């Protein structure tokens, strides 16, 4: 028997799917770092950590006859914006989303035009909660 691995990811902003998604990523960073201490074995004894940093990147291909989504025009301060990301069986919902930057790119003749959206979020919820770590193989 073989195992089929997840090969697609999906993103929706307030319930609206981003179409023509080429790639997406979710990065969670707790800003941990080792605390240098003097010890007899030469190893650090512990670490400190900061707040969660949540970064979301979505890259879309731009359709020739359609304008791309203008997510930079959303008023992120006055509106509640959520992004839901599906990676295989994992579903994450990011809350209090804000746009960091947007980039449009055409790397040369014969390559597609892409738009990259970089978001930050203040909260992140695992909406499924089933991990391979807890399943028997």
Image (cartoon, rainbow, N blue to C red):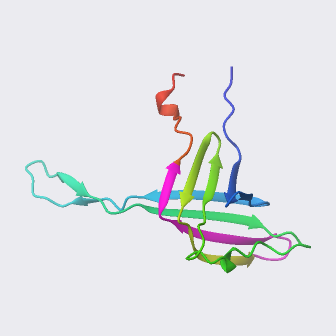
State the residue at coordinates (47%, 64%).
122
- On screen, residue 127 versus residue 14, left or right, reads left
Q: Which of these two is toward me, 90 or 124?
A: 124
User: Could you say where residue 86 lies in the image, as x and y percent from the top left?
Assistant: 65, 48
Which of the 4 quarters of the picture holds residue 37?
A: bottom left
Task: Depth check: give the residue in front, 50 or 111.
Answer: 50
Residue furthest right in the image: 65
Closer to us: 53 or 128: 128
Inspect the magenta stretch and tell me whether residue 122 lies in it.
yes
* Numbered range of the magenta stretch: 107-125
Quadrant of the rendering where the C terminus is positioned: top right
Q: Is residue 45 magenta?
A: no
Which quadrant would residue 71 be assigned to in this image?
bottom right
For residue 52, side relative to residue 91 (left or right):
left
Is residue 71 left or right of 92 when viewed as pictured?
right
How many tags in the picture? 0
Q: Give how far across and how far down residue 28 sits, in percent.
A: 47, 57
Q: Quadrant of the N terminus?
A: top right
Q: Residue furthest top?
A: 1
Q: Label the magenta part by its dominant secondary structure.
A: strand
Relative to 1, is 101 above or below? below
Q: Where is residue 38? Give x, y as percent.
A: 9, 57
Q: At which x and y percent is residue 97?
A: 56, 67
> What residue is rendered at 70% in x and 52% in y?
10
Furthest toward the left, the residue is 40
Residue placed at 12% from the left, 47% from the top? 41
Q: Residue at x 60, y 46 (%)?
A: 91
Image height of 59 relative to 106, above or below: above
């Amino acid at each position: 028997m073989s195992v089929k691995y997840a090969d697609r990811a999906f993103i929706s902003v307030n319930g609206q799917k981003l179409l023509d998604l080429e790639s997406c990523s979710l990065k969670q960073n707790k800003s941990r770092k080792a605390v240098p201490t003097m010890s007899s074995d030469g190893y650090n004894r512990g670490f400190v950590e900061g707040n969660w940093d949540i970064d979301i990147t979505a890259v879309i291909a731009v359709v020739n006859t359609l304008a791309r989504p203008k997510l930079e025009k959303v008023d992120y301060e006055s509106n509640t914006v959520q992004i839901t990301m599906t990676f295989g069986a994992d579903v994450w919902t990011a809350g209090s989303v804000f746009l960091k930057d947007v980039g449009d790119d055409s790397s040369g003749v014969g390559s597609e035009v892409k738009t990259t959206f970089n978001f930050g979020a203040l909260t992140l919820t695992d909406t499924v909660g089933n991990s391979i770590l807890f399943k028997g193989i």
